[in-house]
Image (cartoon, grey):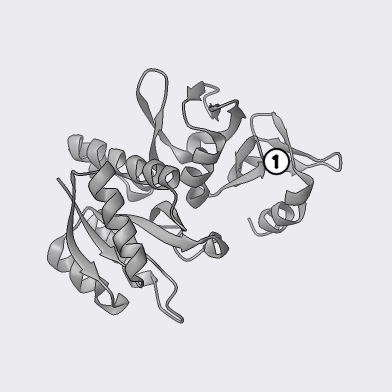
């Protein structure tokens, strides 16, 4: 069983989350429910969970102690966000997945399954679980035609939508065909510094070399992807702050 703490502010979010966990992930055991954010550090200390579901949004709340505690405890964090809060900066060092309100079944299954698979693989390989936190924090499972392949997100350059599947292009020039759609990959990888710049193209912002006036983004593997016109201002603002 995988132990989890749910920190929520609304009853509807709690009920939806509990129902989805019960239906799709019965091996996840909810050990504590919290309504007050100030008690979460004590709850992590007391229950030592492997996974925390957290709905941020408390004004002037200092999240740094939470990220530090999660890192020390080796605990994974899934954030529950409104769409308007999808751009986050104060959790980049510790977030493992994102759920968006209103919660869709596809978003829930993709995000939670990926984090649970990560927990299971880290548990089964003690040496990996004890390795550098920055490595394991960026560790994601990608479903392929043969099974599941685990990658460090820092090695992923971009993802390209191909009908209902996707092609994942990595640093070692190995292309992986995944059963995930490009939308699934966006939900999975945006917390790790990726951006959906076109309806068929998701890129790692750290792999951008330049942007040309013709409307193309050039990446470190010498490939290029088109930038959707509606995404131009958002992308240029993001790139300016890298």
Q: Residues within 10 Å of mark 1 (few under 14, many from 20)?
A: some
Q: Can residue 2 be seen in the rendering of this structure?
A: yes
**1 lies left or right of 226:** left
Q: Quadrant of residue 38?
A: bottom left
- Residue lying farthest to the right in this orientation: 213
| Image position, residue 197 (x, y; %) | 67, 44
Residue named by callout 1: 209
Position of 170 relative to 51 (above/below): above
| Image position, residue 134 (x, y; %) | 38, 49
- Residue at 23 percent across and 48 percent down: it is 22
| Image position, residue 118 (x, y; %) | 30, 40
**16 lies left or right of 158:** left
- Residue at 51 percent across and 21 percent down: it is 174
- Residue at 31 percent across and 75 percent down: it is 37
Between 196 and 26, the residue placed more toward the observer is 26
Position of 50 relative to 35 (above/below): above
Between 123 and 51, the residue placed more toward the observer is 51
| Image position, residue 58 (x, y; %) | 42, 77
SS category of the residue bearing label 1: strand
Position of 30 relative to 106 (above/below): below
- Residue lying farthest to the bottom in this orientation: 60
Q: Can residue 67 be seen in the rendering of this structure?
A: no
């Amino acid at each position: 069983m995988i132990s989890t703490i749910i920190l929520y502010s609304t009853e509807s979010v709690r009920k939806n989350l509990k129902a989805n966990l019960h239906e799709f992930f019965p091996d996840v055991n909810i050990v504590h429910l919290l309504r007050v954010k100030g008690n979460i550090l004590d709850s992590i200390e007391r229950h030592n969970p492997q996974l925390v579901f957290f709905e941020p949004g408390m004004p002037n709340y200092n999240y740094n102690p939470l990220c530090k505690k999660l890192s020390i405890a080796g605990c994974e964090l899934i954030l529950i966000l409104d769409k308007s809060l999808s751009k986050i900066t104060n959790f980049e060092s510790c977030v493992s997945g994102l759920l968006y309100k209103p919660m869709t079944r596809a978003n829930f299954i993709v995000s939670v399954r990926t984090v649970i698979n990560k927990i299971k693989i880290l548990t089964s390989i003690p040496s990996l679980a004890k390795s550098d936190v920055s490595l394991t924090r960026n560790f994601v499972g990608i479903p392929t035609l043969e099974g599941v392949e685990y990658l460090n997100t820092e090695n992923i350059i971009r993802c390209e939508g191909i009908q209902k599947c996707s092609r994942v292009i990595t640093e070692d020039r190995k292309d992986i065909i995944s059963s995930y759609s490009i939308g699934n990959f966006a939900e999975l990888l945006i917390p790790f510094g990726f951006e959906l710049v076109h309806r068929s193209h998701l890129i790692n912002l750290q792999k951008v070399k330049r942007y040309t006036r013709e409307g193309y983004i050039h990446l470190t593997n010498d490939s290029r992807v088109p930038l959707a016109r509606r995404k131009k201002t958002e992308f240029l603002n993001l790139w300016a702050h890298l």
